[in-house]
Image (cartoon, coloured by chain):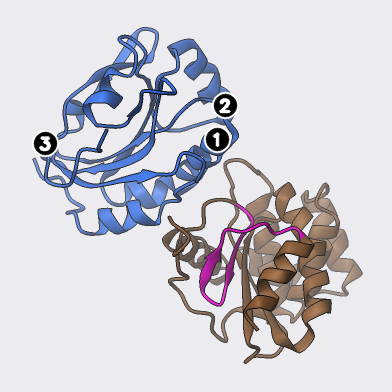
Chain colours: A brown, B blue
Amino acid sequence: MSSSSRLKIPVSKEDHFQGPESAPLVLVEFGDYQCPYCGKAFPIVKRLQGALGNNLKFVFRNFPLSEMHPDALNAAKFAEAAAVQGKFWEMHDLLYENQANLDAESLAGYAKGLNLDLEKLNKATESGSVERRIEADFEGGARSGVNGTPSFFVNGIRYDGDWAYGPFLSALKRLL
Amino acid sequence: MALLKEGTKAPDFSLHSTPDQKVSLSEFKGRNVVLVFYPADWSPVCGDQLALYNEVLPMIRKHNAEVIGLSVDGIWCHLEFVKVRKYRFPILSDFEPKGATAKVYGAYRDHDGTSERALFVIDGDGVIRWSYLSPVGVNPGVDGILDALDTLPKKETA
């Protein structure tokens, strides 16, 4: 609720992450695949990863605003199901690169492009574990002071600053 | 103006949620209530705040709690706001006399003529158990509300 809002569920091995496990900077994004602001943040995070290299670990958690974005939950389930086949980040990136097309047919196309077993993938989206994971991400986010999407946490503390590339990079570098 | 604090009896009110329907706080006896004062319909920040509450409604209702939004906007403005944003909780019009409910809760901004961005968690006996004044431009999120609800009984108390 204030700038001291803290991540209630610490980053763990269960999280989807990129970068070294014990990097000095840990950036957690709570995102929604259909949220246009998350779409804007997507290339910015990529640039931050490029600029900070091994100093940055990036974690993505689900915060689908299903009332506002009718395809968000489905897309989140699809990415989590892709994770079961070891392709979470590939799917995550494809979804953000193709935000305007998150209908079932388009999703199936992305799965094909990644050589995923679509039948297995669809089965996984309906499994309780995928649903529970998304719910746990969402509830943990709400409990941590996520107040919209995207919400960022840097080393466990909500980042309320400007997340345009320049100011975000400077803020992260100051912590190194 | 200071917000009413924890331990204070929450003043009752009866305000329009639609042109021919009123909602009173006393109707919620036995249930917890999250009272959300916000400055104005359609301002981008409160849209986000209320949208978040719309999304977390199932988490809030698990605590035997209901959300009520209030602003000084007129009922016709609220109707359109609720319809477009698909809010699933009542939004009340604190319009005539303007801001009267906000004033008794200590959540009125005299210089702006709007309510503050203020949150109250009220228990089933009508007692304020938590209140929070957010800077007007900051979306306070829902963590404080959930923490406060955690301390209250989840079951019907009255």
Under tag 3, what secondary structure?
loop
Q: Observer-nearest residue: A104 or A83?
A: A83
Q: Is residue A85 visible?
A: yes
Q: Amino acid at mark 2?
A: Trp
Residue at the (26%, 22%) spot, across then down:
B101
Q: Is B153 displayed left or right of B53 in the figure?
A: left
* Lower position in the chain sequence, tag 2 or tag 1: 2
| Circle 1 residues within 10 Å: few <14, some 14–19, many ≥20 | some
A160 lies left or right of A54: left
Residue A147 in the image, given as x and y percentages of width and height: 52, 52
Whole-percent x, y for residue A132 in the image: 50, 67
Amino acid at pointer 1: Gly
Residue A118 placement, left or right of A128:
right
Report the span colored magenta. A149-164
Label 1 marks a residue whose chain is B
Location of residue A43 (image quadrant): bottom right
Chain of the residue displaying label 3: B
- Residue sitting at 45 percent across and 17 percent down? B73
Sequence order check: which comes first, mark 3 or mark 2?
A: 3
In space, the residues marked 1 and 3 are separated at their CA atoms by: 29 Å
Q: Which mark is residue B42?
A: 2
Residue annotated with mark 3:
B9
Crowding around mark 3 (Cα neighbors within 10 Å: few <14, some 14 to 19, many 20+) is some
x, y (%) of residue A66?
59, 47
Q: Residues at badges 3 and 2 in contact (C-beta under 8 Å)?
A: no
Badge 2 vs badge 1, beta-carbon distance below 8 Å: yes
Q: Which mark is residue B47?
A: 1
Task: Kindly report the distance in space between the C-alpha atoms of the residues bearing marks 2 and 1.
Answer: 6 Å
Q: Quadrant of the C terminus of chain B?
A: top left
